[in-house]
Structures are given as structure tokens and as C-alpha cells.
Image: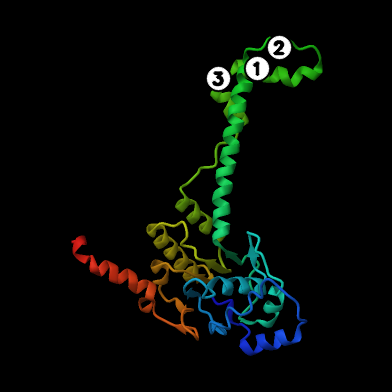
Amino acid sequence: MNYLRSFTFPNEDQEHDFFMEIKRTCYDSFYPFKVLARNGVNRLDFEPITILYGGNGSGKSTVLNVIAEKTGILRDSVYNKSNFYPDYVELCSMETTSDIPETSRIITSDDVFDYMLNIRNLNEGIDQKRENLFDDYLDAKYSQFQMRSMEDYDQLKKVNEARSNTQSRFVRGKLMDNVREYSNGESAFLYFTEKIGENALYLLDEPENSLSPKRQIELLQFIEDSARFFGCQFIISTHSPFLLSMRHAKLYSLDENPVEVRKWTELENVRTYYDFFKQHEDQFE
């Protein structure tokens, strides 16, 4: 499904005209001006799966963040915008085939890392509460408690509960189980499968971060199936040779000026892997 058909960014002439019209004031940054136009990124046409490839500074993440801002899709992590960000987005234009679904979202590395950290912090809090309940159990079971008024009723219930249960049953009755803590790779993969649903546009910024090669291949298959069977559209920035090999994906190389559509086997990053393993081919036999 193609929700977003094309997206056009301001060219160097438009950027020049903009700066000629504003007041001369000192700013720390003109970002995202002077990034994409300088690298020859003007218009991108999208397929159900479109991949953006390029080195650091090529503008891959900038493209995704600008599209996310223009389309107004969901974002979990806070994104710091420069003074000129709204002006730049205003100069952009897009062509859609239908309304962008409300469940569409951008997923960045920050989102995934925050998710993994939240699980870890939650479990640490549960562990601390468990230790406190162990102490409560011993205090209640062996206390010399005597009820003197109705204000002591809650404490009486706790004492009776402690005396009629084992320590483990007492604690389990008052505490939720730990959220299962997966490895970083498992948690990252789980985040994508939880956030990516049906019939929506998804922008993925270097989703291979924290994923093992095996998990990257599983994510590749998940994305291909989501696009083919569940009405999803993906625009992905990546260096991963596994994700770059995605079938039927349109691949833009942002390392070229102007930007060109390439086969994944033509990319320098992929060729480097190929040459390395070819050089050591005999060691795999």
C-alpha cells in the first residue's frame, strides 16, 4: 500500500530565497536547511518499501524526521527541533494516495533504547518491593500484635495473612510478577512487532541497532510480510546488508549527488562485506 506517493524538499534556490527574506540574526544552527539540498536530495518517490542508504551526514535521518513532522504521524521519543525546523517543513510538499492513517508512526533508536530501559527499571522496582514484602512478612508473622480498635483492622488482616501463608505465597499475593526481561536484541525485536500494526505508514530509522544478524533477518521477513499482506508502507534508513537486500524494495543511495536509485549489491557497504567474506571463503569450507 502506498499512503505516501512522493515527498519534495526545498532545493538550494528555495533555501537561498528563504534566507534572503529573514532578518539577519545569529543562530546556533540552520538545521535542517543546508543538509538535503547540499546532498542533492530534492524529490523522493516511494514504493510499499523504500530504503534510504548513505553514510553519516548524508541526511537519512533528516529525511525521516522531516517526513514525520510534515505528515504529523506518531512519535514516542521527544525530538529536539531547531529554530528553523517549522520553516523548513513548511517549504516541503508531499503527494498522498489517501489520508495518512492515524496509527502511522516513526520509530527511532531512541524509542527502542527507552523501551529496553523502561523494562529494566520496572523490574528493578519490582525487585525492591519484593524485598520490602519479605520484611513485612517476617514482621507481621512474629509480631506480638493485639487489636485495640477498628483502626488496627488492616494490620490484623496482614498478621493473619502472614501466619496462614508461606512467605512466598504471601509475597506473590501482593506483588505482580516481573516483566520478562529479554536480551537487548529480543526486546528491540519485540518493540517493532508491538508497534507495527496493520494498514499504516511506518518510518524506521536504522532499525538494525541492537539486533543480531539473525534478528535482522527476522525483522526483514516481518517487514516484507507486513507490506505484502497487511497494508503497511515502510520508509527505512539503514546500513544493514540484510535489510538492504529486502525484496521489491526501492533503494535510494544518498551517498550520490544527486540521489540515485541503486541495486543493493552495488552499494559500497555491501560490497565491503562481500569482498571480506570472499577473501576468507576457504575458511568456511
Residue pointed to by mark 2: 145
Inspect the image, locate mark 1, and give the three-letter code of the amino acid beneath it.
Ala
- Residue 65 shows up from this direction: yes
Inspect the image, locate mark 2, and give the three-letter code of the amino acid beneath it.
Phe
Q: Nearer the viewer, mark 3 or mark 2?
A: 2
Q: Position of residue 88 (x, y in %)?
A: 68, 78
Q: Nearer the viewer, mark 3 or mark 1?
A: 1
The secondary element bearing badge 2 is classed as: loop
| Residue at position x 41%, y 58% in the image | 215
Q: Nearer the viewer, residue 272 or 198?
A: 272
* In the depicted structure, whether residue 176 falls above or below residue 73: above
Residue pointed to by mark 3: 166
Q: Position of residue 141 (x, y in %)?
A: 62, 15
Asked if the residue under mark 2 is in contact with the one under mark 1, i.e. CB atoms within 8 Å, the reply is: yes
Number of other residues with Cα within 10 Å of mark 2, as a class: few under 14, some 14 to 19, many 20 or more: few
**Residues at marks 3 and 1, CA–CA distance in whole angstroms:** 12 Å
| Residue at position x 57%, y 63% in the image | 107
